[in-house]
């Protein structure tokens, strides 16, 4: 997907064009860009299919549009790839071989490395769910690759921007929950895929290189808003057994500590994002953020 980031998208598409896979079909969704992304990209890559949204429908809505397109084709596999990522030439070849070897395997999470430190993990490809903390905290982030993850490992969730899955998965769980807009929509989808009877695993060898949260920025107020609000929605949907314990810890410990840290760092807008995200979760306000103060 692209949203006003044509330079990142061009780098991503150039890497995909070098992939060693004869049946590769590249589909780009432009998620309501207001710059000249579509014109520039279509001229440079005339054989890339470009779907255009009139407005930004978020990660969840955009990927749903891609899923609907995919289900109208005869293709066997689909890969969601963030536009701020670069793939290796053999990435898809490795993934198709891995997914065909494990019975019941429906989704593979791809190893992601920092683009500026290509030997350091951004994610090992997925993780188990931590019900107490309401997240996925053993992703390998920041670790140097010393061969510690050269195996396929069963997980509960994989990063949505580096996801390879079968047609059977898309047919059974054909949409992401658009209430999330961005963040946790991938984890929610993964949990529903597992409930449908499919395995999720990390890749042993497939790699991508990630420029990291180019869509919002890791320190933006919107990042803190969506992460706070959507974590509470995700736990409400999938952490029912420990939700009260989690909610009290979040209310009394985690959120105040985060807000205090942001205020001490004079990141007032980001602190506001945390508070508004918590408030909107309590009121059941989902989909795209409507608070102009955070933009």
Image (cartoon, rainbow, N blue to C red):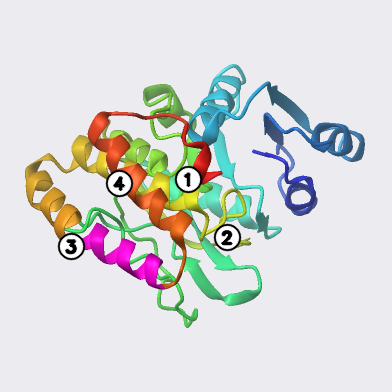
Sequence-wise first label, 3 or 1: 1
Which residue is tagged 4? 231
Horizontal side, residue 135 vs residue 201: left or right = left
* Crowd rating for badge 1 (residues with CA inside 10 Å; few <14, some 14–19, many 20+): many
Along the line of sight, which residue is nearer the eye, 6 or 250? Answer: 250
Depicted 95 relative to depicted 62: above or below: below
Disc 3, SS:
helix
Q: Position of residue 91 (x, y in %)?
A: 62, 56
Which residue is tagged 3? 253
Disc 1, SS:
loop
Q: CA distance from mark 1 to mark 2?
A: 13 Å
Disc 4, SS:
helix
Disc 2, SS:
loop
Q: Does 261 lie within the magenta span?
A: yes
Write the residue at 75% across / 28% down. Answer: 50
The mark lying in front, picked from 3 and 2, is 3
């Amino acid at each position: 997907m692209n949203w006003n980031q044509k330079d990142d998208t061009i780098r991503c598409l150039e890497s995909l064009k070098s992939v060693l896979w004869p049946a590769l079909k590249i589909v780009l969704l432009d998620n309501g860009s207001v710059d000249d992304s579509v014109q520039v990209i279509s001229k440079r890559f005339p054989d890339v299919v470009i779907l255009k949204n009139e407005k930004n429908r978020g990660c969840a809505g955009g990927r749903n549009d891609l899923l609907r397109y995919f289900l109208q084709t005869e293709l066997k596999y689909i890969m969601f790839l963030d536009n701020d990522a670069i793939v290796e030439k053999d990435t898809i070849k490795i993934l198709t071989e891995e997914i065909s070897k494990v019975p019941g395997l429906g989704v593979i999470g791809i190893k992601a490395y920092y683009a500026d430190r290509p030997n350091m993990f951004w994610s090992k490809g997925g993780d188990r769910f931590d019900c107490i903390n309401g997240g996925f905290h053993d992703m390998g982030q920041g670790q140097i690759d010393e061969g510690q993850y050269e195996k396929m490992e069963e997980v509960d969730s994989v990063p949505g921007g580096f996801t390879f899955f079968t047609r059977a998965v898309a047919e059974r769980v054909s949409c992401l929950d658009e209430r999330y807009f961005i963040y946790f929509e991938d984890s929610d989808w993964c949990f529903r895929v597992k409930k449908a009877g499919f395995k999720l695993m990390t890749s042993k060898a497939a790699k991508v290189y990630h420029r990291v949260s180019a869509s919002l920025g890791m320190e933006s107020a919107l990042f803190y808003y969506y992460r706070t609000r959507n974590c509470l929605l995700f736990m409400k949907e999938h952490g029912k057994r420990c939700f009260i314990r989690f909610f009290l810890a979040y209310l009394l410990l985690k959120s105040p500590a985060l807000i205090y840290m942001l205020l001490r760092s004079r990141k007032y807008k980001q602190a506001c994002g945390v508070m508004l995200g918590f408030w909107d979760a309590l009121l059941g306000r989902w989909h795209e953020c409507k608070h102009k103060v955070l933009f």
